Image (cartoon, helix red, strand yellow):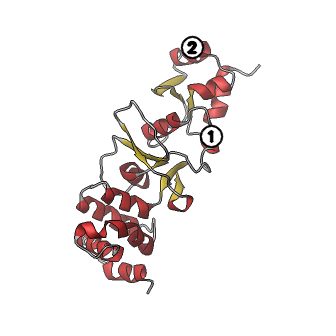
Amino acid sequence: MVSPLTRIRDVAEGQWGLVTLQQARAAGVAWRSLSRLVEGKLLERVAHGVYRVRGAADPDHLALRAAWLQFDPARPAWQRLDDPDVAVVSHASAAALYGVGDLRADVHEFTLAGRRQTRRDDVRIHRGRVPVERRVVLGGLPATRAGPMIGDLLADYIDPDSVAQITAEVLERVLDYPRDVAEALAPQAHRFGFRRGDGLALLDELLRRAGTRDREALLAEARGA
């Protein structure tokens, strides 16, 4: 007979050592068995309805991953990635996943299509659908591509100097291409006094603010030279 812990481990193995209450039930683990595993310190509750298998390696961005699982707690993580309406890690949370900048990441930000609400004070939902070509799978989580993320941060009125530093790090680490970053910046150009849609000028401004040494080479690449 397969033990409750083994059933949970089988599910958690593919999603960073985490399992939701609904997934545990679907695997045939009763609430009483789950409670006993928590009491026996074999499981740890990390968020409402989300548990971590003790003894497994601690995943990075644990709180962010648990918050993401809560959006669709019945479905395993690997079944959601191709869903066009999946919750996508975005804005400052995406920057944290990329490891760029120093924005506060204590609020977990996601972009979702349709109207969704949350009672959590540390979760922020942005409405919108992120097209497949504007997102990547990063550490097993769907996240906005680095270029669109920069555009989202400016659109969210994040401090331009902080966004400038993120832009420089994204391009230095080749997390996205200069042309794509400029394209993502285009909708915000007029807010900074540039011609409407001139993402290249705004990219130049951000690289100037960040003191990027190879600014001219990056701009030439953005122009397609």
Residue 11: image location, x then y, percent: 64, 33
Splitting the image into 4 quarters, where does residue 122 fall?
A: top left
Q: As rendered, which of 43 and 150 lies closer to the eye?
A: 150
Q: CA distance from mark 2 to mark 1?
A: 23 Å
What residue lies at 36% left-to-right and 80% top-to-bottom? 219
Q: Is residue 6 left or right of residue 201?
A: right
What residue lies at 33% left-to-right and 40% top-to-bottom? 106
Amino acid beneath label 1: Gly
Amino acid beneath label 2: Arg
Of the image marks 2 and 1, the number of the one nearer the N terminus = 1
- Residue 51 visible? The answer is yes
Query: Relative to 224, does residue 39 appear above or below in the rendering?
Result: above
Q: As rendered, which of 66 and 110 lies closer to the eye?
A: 110
Query: Relative to 144, does residue 104 appear above or below in the rendering?
Result: above
Task: Tell me the tag on residue 174.
Answer: none
Q: Which residue is mark 2?
A: 36
- Residue 212 visible? The answer is no
Splitting the image into 4 quarters, where does residue 28 fall?
A: top right
Q: Is residue 13 left or right of residue 1?
A: left
- Tell me how many marks there are: 2
Q: As rendered, which of 154 and 105 lies closer to the eye?
A: 154
Query: Relative to 21, does residue 166 appear above or below in the rendering?
Result: below
Q: Which residue is mark 1?
A: 14
Residue 211: image location, x then y, percent: 24, 72
Residue 95: image location, x then y, percent: 38, 54
Tell me the quarter of the image containing the N terminus.
Answer: top right
Labelled pair 2, 1 in contact (Cβ < 8 Å): no
Task: List the single residue furthest toward the bottom.
Answer: 225
Instruction: Count residues near mark 2 (Cα–Cα under 10 Å), then give few for <14, some for 14-19, many for 20+.
Output: few
Instruction: Count residues near mark 1 (Cα–Cα under 10 Å), then give few for <14, some for 14-19, many for 20+.
Output: some
Splitting the image into 4 quarters, where does residue 20 fall?
A: top right
